Amino acid sequence: MTTFRFIHCSDLHIDSPFKGLSAVEPRLARRLLESTYKAFNNIVDLAVQEKVDALIVAGDVYDSADRSLQAQFRFRNALAHLSQAGIPAFIAHGNHDPLDRWSNHLDWPSLATVFPGDRVEAHPVTKNGKTVAHVYGISFPRRDVTENLSLRFKRGGHPGFAVGVLHTNVGGRPGHDPYAPCTVSELSAPGMDYWALGHIHAREVVQAESPAIVYSGNTQARSVREAGPRGCYLVTLTSGAPPEARFTATDAVRYETQTLDASRLQTVDDILHACLETVDALATKAGERDLVVRLTLTGRTPVHQEIVSPGGLAGLQEQIQLYFEVHDPLVWVDLVVDTRGDYDIDALGQGQDFLADVVALFQEAAQGKHPQVIEEALKPLFADWPGRKYLEETTREDRAAWLEAARGLVLDRLVDHR
């Protein structure tokens, strides 16, 4: 029985600048800057510990085409550690680190292979003197690759398993540049056993077998938009059996988002204690890694005006940070308040006053009335603003949510100031 065990990772984005750090606590800023290096070192340590047969990196090793010399040194040093352990590494470059900006001024470890940009190459992996697999791959020769590179792959008559390495957007996933676009059927044609893909930062098993098509996701999140564990897949290919892909978290800093319903909380202290309990639980779940949490307060609470008043949010966040000041690993909380005042909208609508008229007006708008008034209100943003072309088309659900939010903002000011 032949087996081939390897680690599949991608989108390391080493030396990522983590924009916006000037507003963050200095200790966290330093740890964020180190996190992409540490995440890849965690992968190397895992490879050595698991004694895998190979490590595969499916593009975007670096965050920028103008990669720093420090980033190249540190990546090379990690690969050298793998070579010393007898583990070969196969690297494809993507749109963030295309080959036309690649540095050849450093000597790379003998067991590190960088795929070329002009053709698909196949390299053997041997174990105990036997060839167990061939790894096929191609790099981006330049940033903007719109060619369907999957059409260049074709399994040769080599012994062992066949693994394809490609930086690509499969199926035109929205929100991602259409680099090297292809389809699942096109990836199924060349006869690979496993596709190690990069470019999409969310991990996904696109297809489980025949062949397995897998996005490993990025190894380290770079913002709260990439919440949750980030890491790599430990893959085992066994003759006569479906592929096995086990995800392992390798991130050094974990991002999380959490919503906290404040509707049953009666005092600011109640809210503070609930925030601390929520973040404490997330910190425990994150384990021995630093944690950045975006915590959003929602619901109707009698202390709404206190926490949205000038200095209210800052004061609440300061108390939360003081609690975690001595916590190691480090915890940073970004607090967002999306609460509303504690009042009964239905009861307000039954009155005979101005507030009842306001409630009725919003209800009519939600039912599709007054469209011209709404269009006129949105005109500065959706008709006159030059940046309109960068905005996505709005849906009926979007506008319903805006109306509800607007009603809350209006009533918060009117109800509490009658």
Image: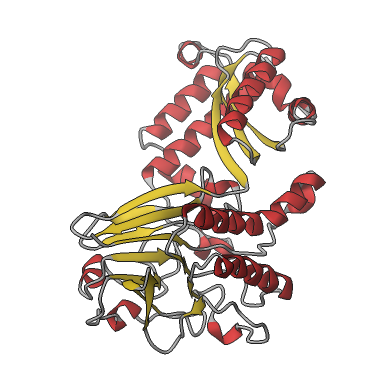
Q: Quadrant of the N terminus?
A: bottom left
- For the view shown, which residue lies furthest in the left direction? 240
Q: Position of residue 83 (x, y in %)?
A: 56, 70
Q: Quadrant of the C terminus?
A: top right
141 over 126 or under it: above or below:
below
Is residue 63 visible in the rendered image? The answer is: no
Q: Quadrant of residue 135?
A: bottom left
Name the residue: 25% across, 76% down. 159
Q: Quadrant of residue 330?
A: top right
Q: In the visual, does 346 lie left or right of 418?
A: left
Q: Position of residue 293 (x, y in %)?
A: 62, 37
Q: In the visual, does 73 lie left or right of 170?
A: right
Q: In the visual, does 406 lie left or right of 6?
A: right
Name the residue: 22% across, 82% down. 157
- For the view shown, which residue lies furthest in the front direction? 128
Q: Position of residue 360 (x, y in %)?
A: 45, 23
- For the view shown, which residue lies furthest in the bottom direction? 118
